[in-house]
Amino acid sequence: MRKPFVAGNWKMNTDSHTSVKLVERIACGSEETAGQSITVAVCPPFVYLQAVAKALSSSSIAVGSQDVYFEREGAFTGEMLKDVGCSYCLCGHSERRHVIGESDELINKKVAAAIAGGLLPILCVGELLEEREASQTNEVVTRQVKEGLAGLIAEKIQAVTIAYEPVWAIGTGLTATPEQAQEVHDFIRKLLGQMYNKKLAGEIRILYGGSVKPDNAADLMSQKDIDGSLVGGASLKADDFLAIIQAAV
Ligand code: PGA
């Protein structure tokens, strides 16, 4: 029922040449699946968004940004994402929460602004290692989901994808086991059911992120509530990213 979704978060990697080469290879290798049996998106660094969107103009791969500002226009940084070809944007990625210090309140403004601007936000949530060890995972995720979506009515929520990314698994080589991830995905889906309704909760895609690689992707994707993945490091290698896409179809 839910179409699988694999998104690559390139973070601050590639350059003007390699960003285009990378998407050309991804587009070529996913021609038969992307857009039809699976949603595929790449989130390149801001400065290469336009070049990447142009290189993908005749493909079904979507482009996303790694962040968004909540004001529409004015004396801000001018993140005119739609204008440069973005359809998706990440909101509240762990690096924004824990390195830059973004609050749930700010992330909520970004999610709302993204929807208002016609973008499809990917709201990232996930606990720190010490929070998991203190059995606070559900509590943390509940706060991040509830506050991240505060004030958004059911009709707006259809635009949202959730990415569960345990912070201890991001870029560390440690991955949640498929069972650990499924447990949290199931919890988030039930929470969405309480916040909205069961039907809507059953339609929202929940991606797993945190050291997803070709060799663990299939096991993660086989879980009932894992609808795809948000891939960091492995999305920078076309063959690895294509293998992860294939595992999710
Ligand atoms: P990783 O990053 O796959 O390199 O762990 C995931 C992410 O930060 O979204």
Image (cartoon, rainbow, N blue to C red):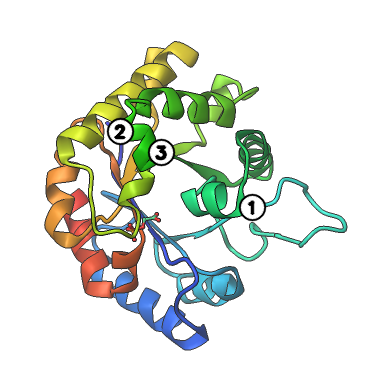
Task: Find disc 2 in the rendering and name its residue.
Answer: 133
**Residue 214 position by quadrant:** bottom left
Circle number at residue 46:
none
**Residue 236 position by quadrant:** bottom left
The extreme bottom residue here reads 17
**Comparing marks 3 and 2, which lies closer to the viewer?**
2
Q: Which of 141 and 39 is in front in this view?
A: 141
Residue at left offset 22%, top offset 68%: 240
Q: What element carries label 1?
A: loop
Residue at left offset 18%, top offset 63%: 243
Q: Earlier in the sequence, mark 1 or mark 3?
A: 1
> Measured from the top left, where is residue 211 in percent x and y?
27, 56
Circle 3 packing at 10 Å, graded few (<14), some (14-19), many (20+), is many
Residue at left offset 32%, top offset 33%: 132
- Asked if the beta carbon under badge 1 is closer than 8 A to the nearest atom of ligand 1, the reply is no
> Measured from the top left, where is residue 23 in percent x and y?
39, 74
Q: How far apart are marks 3 and 2 (CA)?
A: 13 Å
Task: Find disc 1 in the rendering and name its residue.
Answer: 68
